[in-house]
Amino acid sequence: MLEEEYVKILISKDRNEEFHRMAEASCALGRRLSALQNTCEHEITRGGVHPHDPKTRTHSIVGNVESKYDTYESGICWICGKEFGWYCPDSPKHICEYRLIKDFNGVEYYDESCTYCHQPGERK
């Protein structure tokens, strides 16, 4: 009986060590991914679709790596998968930009529509 408990402890310890190794590898991959995204020369397209081949889209970098983006409203770099917010066909950066406004009390807030395409910040 005592032997069985000892074996269970060893198995748990082995699992803990394996989990620790995997967690360290995951952190290292996360840092590598972040470095790649920070050095990417982003090409932002609607929904991360390749600019010359609409059948090719970027893969999700969050959650299930095998899933692909299915929203065409987001401005996503088709190379690295980084999301930048709403896609804007009129903006030079291809993302909606909102003007910072100060009211008469000096409180700052962003305009509700994009400076370029004039779409609302909250789209339905």
Image (cartoon, rainbow, N blue to C red):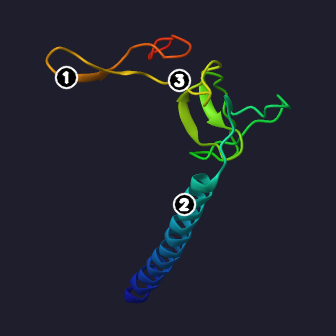
Residue 15 shown left or right of residue 40 in the figure: left
**Which quarter of the image is occupied by the N terminus?**
bottom left
Residue 42 shown left or right of residue 124 in the figure: right
- Image vertical order of residue 39 relative to residue 85, above or below: below
Residue 74 shown left or right of residue 107 in the figure: right
Q: Residue at x 71, y 39 (%)?
A: 78
Q: Nearer the viewer, mark 1 or mark 2?
A: 1
Residue 39 disc label: none
Q: Which sits earlier in the primary sequence, circle 3 or circle 2?
A: 2
- Image vertical order of residue 117 relative to residue 57, above or below: above
Q: CA distance from mark 3 to mark 2?
A: 27 Å
Amino acid type of the residue that numbered disc 3 sits on in the rendered structure: Cys
Amino acid type of the residue that numbered disc 2 sits on in the rendered structure: Gly
- Image vertical order of residue 119 relative to residue 77, above or below: above
Residue that numbered label 2 is attached to: 30
- Image vertical order of residue 90 relative to residue 61, above or below: above
Q: Which sits earlier in the primary sequence, circle 1 or circle 2?
A: 2
Q: Residue at x 53, y 23 (%)?
A: 96
Q: Position of residue 43 (x, y in %)?
A: 69, 39
- Crowd rating for badge 2 (residues with CA inside 10 Å; few <14, some 14–19, many 20+): few
Question: Is the C-beta separation of discs 1 and 3 under 8 Å?
Answer: no
Residue that numbered label 3 is attached to: 96
Q: Secondary structure at mark 3?
A: loop
- Along the viewing direction, whichever of 5 and 14 lies nearer the viewer: 14
Q: Secondary structure at mark 1?
A: loop
Q: CA distance from mark 1 to mark 2?
A: 37 Å
Residue that numbered label 1 is attached to: 107
